[in-house]
Image (tube, rainbow, N blue to C red):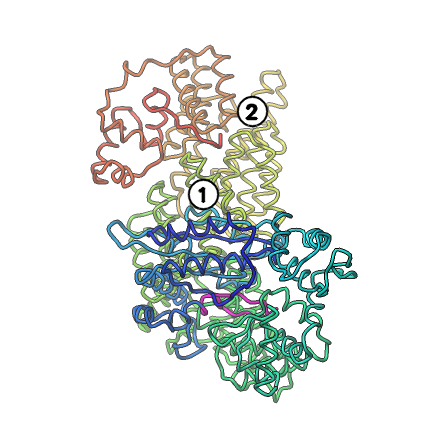
Amino acid sequence: MAQTFGTPFIGREDELARLTGVLERAAAGDPRAVLLAGDAGVGKTRTLTEAAAHAASTGMTVLTGHCVDLGDVGLPYLPFTEILGAAAADERLAPAFTAHPAVDRLIGTASGTGGTPDPGGRLQLFEGIAGLLADLADLTPLLLVLEDLHWADQSSRDLLRFLLSRGVLQRPSPGGPPRRLAVFASYRADDLHRRHPLRPLLAELIRLPAVDRLELRPMADADVARLVRALRTGPVSDGTVRRIVDRAEGNAFYAEELLAALPGDDTPDSSGVPGGLGSLADVLLIRIEQLSETAQQVLRTAAVAGRRVGHDLLRDAVQLPEEELESALREAVGRQLLLPGDDATYSFRHALTREAVYADLLPGERVRLHGLFARLLAEEGRSAKSAAERAHHSRESHDLADALAASLEAADHAQLVGAPAEELRHLETALELWAVVDADARPESHDTVTLTLRASAAAARAGEPHRAVQLTRSALARAGADTDSELAARVRYTLAGNLIRIDSLNDAFTYSSEALALIPAEPPSYTWVWAAATHVMAARQVGREEDAERVARQALEIAERLRLGDAQADLIISLVGMEAHNRRTAQGRDRLRRARELARTAGNLPVEMRALFNLAIGCYESGALDECLTWVGDGLDRARRAGLLSSPYALELRYLESLVLYTLGRWDECARAAAEDAELLPSAGGFATGPALYVALARGELDAATTGARALLDRPFDWMATLVASVVLTDAAALRGDAEEAVRRMSASVEALTDASVSERPDVVVRLAALTLAAVADAAEESRLSGDATAAKRCAETAADLLELARSTAARGEDGTEQGPEGLAWLARAEAEGVRAATGPDVDAWDRAVTAFGYGDPYELARCRRRLAEALLTADRREEAAEQAHAARDTAVRLGAVPLREAVDALVRRGRLVDTPAPGDRIAALTARESDVLRLLGRGRTNRQIGEELFISGKTASVHVSNILAKLGAASRTEAVAIAYREGLIEPETTAST
């Protein structure tokens, strides 16, 4: 950091000590990051400069990057471009770049712009930068400083997230070289309004173990007074010091500027601080007015350029003789308004100074200077940075034709470096300008249909599916009758794909059908294959299975002839869903693994994510929950490293992870993950944390759960959000004993979910029917007890209708396949609740439900055991009833499921159920190793994880688990854990969340 200060460092000794402590740990091989927060002018830059000076004095290499505020300009990766450029210019570090060619795109050595975006390029870039920084830290202890994160572009935020969460801060493997790296990043806390895009990133980063947050609070009055006295070369009266302290309110920069604005003859009798100053800007302008007219001209010109400007560009803009320019710059530097940099640049000492000068410009003066900079940047060359800045200056100077050309150049660069959010901003600007620029001034190499289609693709990659749909519809509207048929088809199948992502399925099928009708299958073409692949997905969504399978097989054969690996992968995934060996089978998942490899080899990350999602959901549907979590982890890690955690399949995987944690009874993990994700997910991804609402509901937090569910319904319609809310609100009504509300809620939910899916009723209807039947059965039993035969009959009729709905839904299934373990378990429960509503609790029906939920859902297993205990008690099988009741209670206690525990306790009291036999009477003794394995089973560990913790193979762990199940008489791992808790073989671990 080239900035220097002539003022003493006062009042930040503790903060500096924390930063130097981090530097010492980093130099010793413990990589760390610090996020430095504070209001504008509070001293962030000064503190970082002192820390950087300390780092340099101890032999660390300091590399600094700045984020800039240029309004509507998107400069992707700007601070990292600056950091990497400085590193490449260092003779000691330059050799490390040869091993990471992907980084060349950021430092200007890559060739070419535009073209087809490389879906894997962003990941390669991120991994390349992480690898390069690791190599640089091997060469020298390294400090990266990023200033003004509140102005960072989205791509820079994504890259920082990747580096800190998955890259440079990870400790090296055992035996590897220590990673001698520290990252300091500053941001203005007072600029972060509620919807500021930096807020969710900060919320995520500060939870990382290697990241600390350091807040610079306003300085103490005594420290401000010390600063004022230290800055003044001559005497300053106590009254003046007091007035400055009062006005500055702990802001060091404001105090310095107030002092600098004082007249030179301050005495105890003088008025001291000038009156009539309404703000810091007023004080700054008084300071600037004390400069010569030439120096003021230079400052005004520099303010239009931005926070920092190169010497040559500034010289050409002010058009002064060299000696006059140097004199003016020396004056501004001497007054600590500008600071010289090592790279022939000048920076405003503080962004607030630049903002005050810029705001004071006359409108005509501002337009003229922006136009001047646009012309100079056009002459300077066609670098990516100059194109984006030129676009900004051209718009501000009302040269719209040049702004259009520069925006297109800037979009090409953003695409090249994998910055979809910035590409989208530039393309949308270009489309706005296109309409107001004369036809003869528009670039001949572009047209609005292609540009709009490209913008929709950028929006999709940036995680904005609804914006992608709007833009693709706009492209369709712009495509006239004379549009090339291949382009017209591409617009339609792109629109269909985007509509599928927002669950507009009928429209998706319409447009995919139109796309296929526009172009022939022969001769084979890329466009037809992808139009067909999209049509296959759309046709399946609306129940046109035969049409989908016919087109898929034809398209797969053509994709193989054309060697389109990613299209092959996409079509294989679709076909697996239509074949007997579907994703629930081992054969189906083998084909999905092949599809994943094809997509990965082709570099098509969205298709790879689709394959990973299908692998995960296939395991879930077949009851292989541990394997499901493994695939979920792979998919989320892939998305995280690519900066695509908000993409559609990544959101689905986050939901699935949360659902599996809930299903396995790992409720604290489920709730914790939801709390961490709450500020990170886009509004359209709120459903991903939905299973945490199931946890809240089961733990008796009915108000919180129903409030969260209604919030999901208050947003624009989303099928998954509606599903989650439907489950919560239906179960909540049942828990409250409100059968009528449960029936109403279920009916509305089935209508909404079925209309949206445009197919057979979705599988979740079986679960909703079972939950509603529980409330109806309760009402029927109450009616029978009170002697109200009419009400009991009415309940039985309602139950019969609900049971028929569950049976018919389960028999057909939303995708035409038979139910998996979860669906069969909910159907068994619906059957048992139906019998209970008609005639009372039935032992055999509830025994079947208990067995069905043994696949791995301890909570629903316990709820069924409670009902089985009631049925056994009614049949006067008291010992068996007691065993089931105590098993249900043990699970309820372990999970913190208060309503279930209270219901079981009431049953035990009412039925005067005795304790179950002692464990020694019926359980074979476990070996010491088996006890260790059982303890880890209780923590939800997989066989592989058990093996790692006990230093045995996963296969050996599996043998121990099988022996434990046999000795405990358990049908599943979940049941074994429940028995172990009940029998006191393992003790519940205390958690903070119950």
Q: Label 1: which residue?
A: 658
Q: Is residue 166 left or right of residue 651?
A: left
Query: Which residue position holds label 2?
Result: 778
The residue shown at (49%, 50%) is 204
Q: For numbered disc 1, what is the local secondary structure?
A: helix
Q: Which residues are magenta?
A: 65-82
Q: Magenta region's main secondary structure?
A: loop
Mark 1 against mark 2, which lies toward the viewer? 1
The amino acid pointed to by label 2 is Asp
Relative to 843, does residue 698 appear above or below in the rendering?
below
SS label for mark 2 = helix
Q: Residue at x 70, y 79 (%)?
A: 365
Q: Give percent across and percent down for residue 980.
A: 33, 24
Compared across the picture, whether 149 is left or right of 358 comes to: left
The three-letter amino acid code for the residue at tag 1 is: Ser
* 215 inside magenta stretch: no
Residue 74 among those drawn in magenta? yes
Where in the figure is residue 460, as x and y percent of width and height?
Answer: 50, 63
Residue 829 figure quarter = top left
Q: Is residue 527 above or below residue 868?
A: below
Instruction: Determine which of the numbered discs, if any, sits on residue 444 in the image.
Output: none
Res. 267 image quadrant: bottom right
Q: Position of residue 453 (x, y in %)?
A: 53, 72
Is 364 displayed left or right of 23 in the figure? Answer: right
Q: Is residue 444 visible?
A: yes
Label 2 CA crowd tier, 10 Å (few <14, some 14–19, many 20+): some
Please determine whether, in this image, residue 762 is positioned above or below residue 462.
above
